[in-house]
Structures are given as structure tokens and as C-alpha cells.
Image (tube, grey):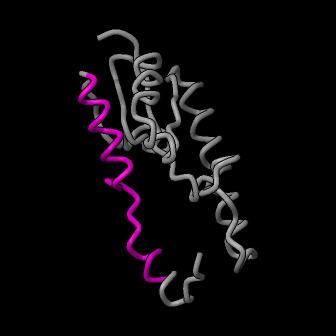
Amino acid sequence: MDKLSAERRSANMRRIRNTDTNPEVELRRLVHRLGYRFRLHRKDLPGRPDIVFPGRQKVIFMHGCFWHQHPGCREGRMPGSRVDYWRPKLDRNQTRDAANQAQLEEQGWKVLVVWECELKDSKSLAKTLRRFLGGL
């Protein structure tokens, strides 16, 4: 794998959005195809969950493997350069994720985290979603 120049990496990072990412849209399409209806990014809930099922008291977070440091995932590894910058940033993401999830659970919400790499196996993910969301 070729190393990216600092300028190229910086340009790539600037293009990354925090909502309506390709993985998030792909997850929403799958959930919709399964017959579930939902709300998006409820600002009144901790962490602004990506997908919210108010009647079921359930939320789904779509986590990018890199940004949220998916354990055991190839994409969730720490970058080799500028570790002094990346480690605190990525650690803060994980700390914030855990705090948001704990707050939601204290408020009576059930939380599911879907990792970006799980989108590769849509059949398995569909089973996970049905199990989490229950019957229609």
C-alpha cells in the first residue's frame, strides 16, 4: 500500500462528512428495505444517534471503523504518522461514544452500534437488525 502525502491525506480528511455518509445512507436503505421506519439525528438525544426508532425506544449508531477505532478491525488501526495528534483525538471519540451510550441507556433507550465493516455482509447485518428491532 502506497503512503499518502501529507497534502493528499489532508485533502481526503476535509472531504469526510459527519452526517449522510455513504455507510450511513447504505445502512438506512437496508433498514428501510426491511420495512422499518425511523427518524434521523435527533438533536435532543445524547450523541445525536444516526437512526432513531422513537416508538421502540431504540437507536442505531453507524460507526466508521477508523474514527471510532473498531477493535480487531483492519480499518480500526492507529495511523503510523502523527500518533501524538491521532491518539488523543480517537480516544476522545471512544470516550464520548461510551458516555453517550450510557446516557441513552439511563434514559431507557436500547442502543445498537453498527460498524462500517459490517455493511460488507448485508445478510448477517439484516439478521442483527431484525433481532434488535423486533417484529414489525
Q: Is residue 4 above or below residue 99?
A: below
Rendered location of residue 45, percent (x, y)? 44, 37
Please identify the dominant SS of the magenta region.
helix
Rendered location of residue 46, percent (x, y)? 50, 40
Q: How many marks?
A: 0
Q: Residue furthest top?
A: 135
Q: Is residue 60 above or below residue 105?
A: below
Query: Residue drawn at (49%, 40%), measured in percent from left and top?
Result: 118
Query: Residue drawn at (51%, 46%), measured in percent from left and top?
Result: 117
Q: Residue furthest front?
A: 1
Q: State which quarter of the image contains the C terminus.
A: top left
For the record, the magenta segment spans 10-34
Q: Is residue 79 above or below residue 32?
A: below
| Left or right position of 18 against 2 | left
Q: Is residue 77 magenta?
A: no
The quadrant holding residue 56 is top left
Q: Nearer the viewer, residue 30 or 90?
A: 30
Rendered location of residue 52, percent (x, y)? 36, 31
Q: Is residue 17 magenta?
A: yes
Q: Nearer the viewer, residue 125 or 20?
A: 125
Q: Residue furthest right?
A: 84
Q: State which quarter of the image contains the N terminus.
A: bottom right
Query: Residue drawn at (35%, 40%), measured in percent from left and top?
Result: 27
| Left or right position of 21 against 33 | right
The quadrant holding residue 12 is bottom left
Q: Nearer the viewer, residue 12 or 123?
A: 123
Query: Residue drawn at (48%, 86%), measured in percent from left and top?
Result: 8
